[in-house]
Image: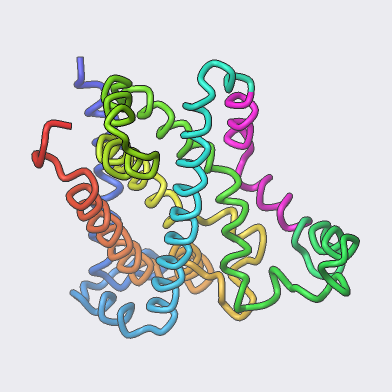
Amino acid sequence: MMLPAVAFLAVFVGWPLVQFVRDSFYAIEPFGGDREFIGLANYSAALASDAFTGAAWRTLVYTVIVVALEFTLGLAVALLFSALGDRSRVFRTIFMYPLMIAPVVAGLLWRFLLIDNFGILNELLRRVGILQSTDQIQWLSNPDIALFSVALPDIWLTTSFITLILFAGLQNVPEELLEAARIDGANYPTILFRIILPLLRPVIAVALIIRGIDAARAFDIILIQTNGGPQGSTETLSLLVYRTLVRFGDPGLASAMGTMYLMGMLLVAVVAVYAIWRPGSDRS
């Protein structure tokens, strides 16, 4: 029964991945297709490149910003929905609406909200007296805050995803255990950090790994808003690999960058599983 799925994955995922890693060891002519084996030269060139190290650092910062804010907001909303019970049914439905919006559409929407001089957000802030002029905060043009600004659409889009996963996990927390803690005089922070969150470790690990990998490979939502600018302050690894392949025509170097990118995400995922989930440490 599993053979069709295995065959599909082998043909459309496994084989392209093998070819991708194999290309990283070659110098490849983008048009003629001629290739020359050069070993680890592409990896050395990538690691020696300021563009690659800078993009890796920005990808890490972007991922931490997105995942940290999404988890904090998602956990707060999931706890609120759980406390409301069936009364939160309508609010849960409304809260999931951003998941239906394509990232490209979200990027365009937030670009109009944040764009300099005539952005809707700055105009609202000016009208309520927070800003003196609409160009006082340059969300997408200031290199110091542009990376945070392009993260806002991602946070808005997928906080509901974290909320959905955590809310489902909260439904499996035994109410008898919580009630016993309340009878023993435990306050809510103690219940949250000593009972609820430890029981949610597997769910939290899955949510953070999925969202972390998804945020780390953010491409279209950044491309639409800033195209990697200003001054390369929002150029993440996905954008750099794309430009190395398409604009600069270097498939071998792009494959080396992408391979290291993939290995980095796998390493982070494994660390997250053992640091958060800690399989085998208990029976929770």
Residue sitting at the far right = 127
* Colour mapping used in the image: rainbow
The residue lying toward the viewer, choosing from 255 and 165, is 165
Q: Quadrant of the C terminus?
A: top left
Q: Which residue corresponds to the image point at 80% horizontal and 76% vertical from the top-left?
A: 136
Q: Can residue 54 be seen in this view?
A: yes
Q: In this view, does 200 lie to the left or right of 239?
A: left
Q: Is residue 82 left or right of residue 23?
A: right
The magenta segment? 91-112
Q: Can residue 31 be seen in this view?
A: no
Measured as percent of width and height from the top left, residue 252 is found at 33, 69
Which image quadrant is residue 2 in?
A: top left
Q: Which residue corresponds to the image point at 27% horizontal and 25% vertical from the top-left?
A: 180
Q: Chief secondary structure of the magenta span?
A: helix
Measured as percent of width and height from the top left, residue 102 is found at 62, 40
Which image quadrant is residue 227 in?
A: bottom right
Q: Which residue corresponds to the image point at 27% horizontal and 37% vertical from the top-left?
A: 195
Q: Does the magenta stretch include residue 105?
A: yes
For the image shown, how many numbered marks are present on the structure?
0
Measured as percent of width and height from the top left, residue 254 is found at 38, 67
Using the image, determine if residue 38 lies above or below residue 48. above
Using the image, determine if residue 114 lies above or below residue 196. below
The residue lying toward the viewer, choosing from 3 and 115, is 115
Q: In this view, does 134 lie to the left or right of 218?
A: right
The residue lying toward the viewer, choosing from 56 and 36, is 56
The residue lying toward the viewer, choosing from 32 and 59, is 59
Q: Which residue corresponds to the image point at 30% horizontal and 27% vertical from the top-left?
A: 183
